[in-house]
Amino acid sequence: MKDNKTHKKYEFLADDPNVKVLPIMLSLIIGAFFAILNETLLNIALTTLMHEFNITLPTVQWMATGFMLVMGIVIPVSALLLQWFTTRRLFLGTMIVFTIGTTISAIAPTFSILLVGRLIQAIGTGLLMPIIFNVFLLIYPPHKRGKIMGLIGLVIMFAPAIGPTLSGIIVEYLGWRYLFITVIPFALFSILFAYKYLINVSEVTKPKIDILSIIYSTIGFGSIIYGFSAVGESEAGFFSPNVYIAIVVGVIGIVLFSIRQLKLEEPVMDLRVFKYPMYTHAVLMFVIIIMAMFASEIILPIYMQGPLALSAATAGLVLLPGSILNGLMSPFMGHLFDKFGPRLLMIPASIVLSGTMFMFSRLNMDTPLWVLITGFILIMLTVSAIMMPAETNGLNQLPKQLYPHGTAVMSTLQPVAGAIGVSVFISIMNARQLNFLQKAENPTDALTINQAMVAGVELVYFIGFGMTVIAVLLAFLVYRAVPKELSEISKKEG
């Protein structure tokens, strides 16, 4: 069995000339690309699904909300699964689950069955990224990880960038079911390719399963994501009982989960990863950058389709160059990280990002399109120069036994930070709009309404500017991280 193959002669598999690393990488990247592509592939088809199944907007939004919710529930337990199953079995199982969900969605006769298929897809998608990060950490030594993490960054950013465009073409010419049908052959290819080439790279330790931790985690992260995702579904916003009760329950669940993890000898998610300064630094940078990026990707299209009166297609084209460049530049940024370390990338990039956010806080109704295109390109390029280097540097400081936990924490924070960022920024924008209109002499005038929206967008970007100033300060504190055991080995060899 390939699961039983071990390579203990070398510290990292990439250094073993007998191991073909490229097929292992391809197995993982192919699966990840189509799973992540699937996240955004459906967004443009929500209106079509409303007409197809005769359902309301709040109902169809569960295709997105439910997807994020399930991811938030399964990702925290990924560290446990990574220690219970071999790499090969876990990846193959995850891709099979994803393919089953995709197939159910493709043939779904009713919306409820379509939603079930979508939620099964989310289980596979949620587990894939922790698996991939953990495998690459085990395969490559720290001084080679930047370029590899850059390849992952290309997958993470390029797939969502082409998702809406690809989705629009498929829905218009083939129909919404082909959004799932076209993914199935690639998912099957990934399974067959991994079955042939993927070997086990992790150690199966089978730690004790703490049921109470899993319950706390499910309630905590699930409720937080649901609460923040539901903000836009009610006019009351954060004051809606559905929202604030879910958020309070979520916070209590996460606090109980965290306390329990610190008491357990074998925690489900080991929070002792935060004892490592560069890992904690990376998490802070990661959250700030994710929220700043979401502010631009959500708020900018609203501004363009509102005050600037652009069509949805034009707004999408304005954002496309930045999104594509972000993905394409990730491997290059990773190579620079390997060669020069994090400071050379993160300090200038965070300064440029902060300056761009300030520039966007001065948007008005006459801002030319070239400013928006250039500004968004700068935001996305600086994000690629900060996020992956910060994440790689933080994970580099962890000892091997904490890799599953470090990747689980990072992967959990992505949907949580995304849900919080979107709801908070939209709420801030709406509150500023209402305040502007209440003070206006003619609040029903179209020009006044557009001015109110501009005021809301300006405030969001000014708050984003404040957050990125914190990122600049953090960038000056970063240093190249090396695991303690490797630094001791290099001292002995030196």
Image (cartoon, grey):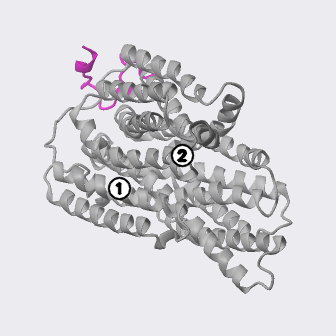
Report the label total.
2
Of labels 1 and 2, earlier in sequence is 2
Looking at the picture, how far across and down is residue 233, in whole percent?
Answer: 53, 60
In terms of depth relative to the viewer, which is nearer, 281 or 231? 231
Q: Is residue 254 magenta?
A: no
Looking at the picture, how far across and down is residue 144, in whole percent?
Answer: 46, 37
Residue at which label 1 appears: 221
Looking at the picture, how far across and down is residue 229, in whole percent?
Answer: 48, 58
Q: Give the SS element for disc 1.
A: helix
- The relative height of residue 78 versus residue 464 in the rendered view (above or below) is above
Q: Is residue 20 magenta?
A: yes
- The relative height of residue 145 versus residue 473 in the rendered view (above or below) is above
In terms of depth relative to the viewer, which is nearer, 453 or 483? 453
Which residue type carries mark 1? Phe
- Measuring 25% from the left and 57% from the top, which residue is drawn there? 272
- Measuring 66% from the left and 60% from the top, which residue is drawn there? 299
- Measuring 38% from the left and 24% from the top, which residue is drawn there? 96
Q: Give the SS element for disc 2.
A: helix
What label does residue 136 carry, if any? none
Which quadrant of the rendered structure holds the N terminus? top left
- The relative height of residue 467 versus residue 403 in the rendered view (above or below) is below
- Measuring 67% from the left and 24% from the top, which residue is drawn there? 174
Magenta range is 1-22
Q: Could you tell me if residue 15 is visible in this image?
A: no
Residue at which label 2 appears: 60
Label 1 crowding class (10 Å Cα cut-off): few <14, some 14-19, many 20+? many
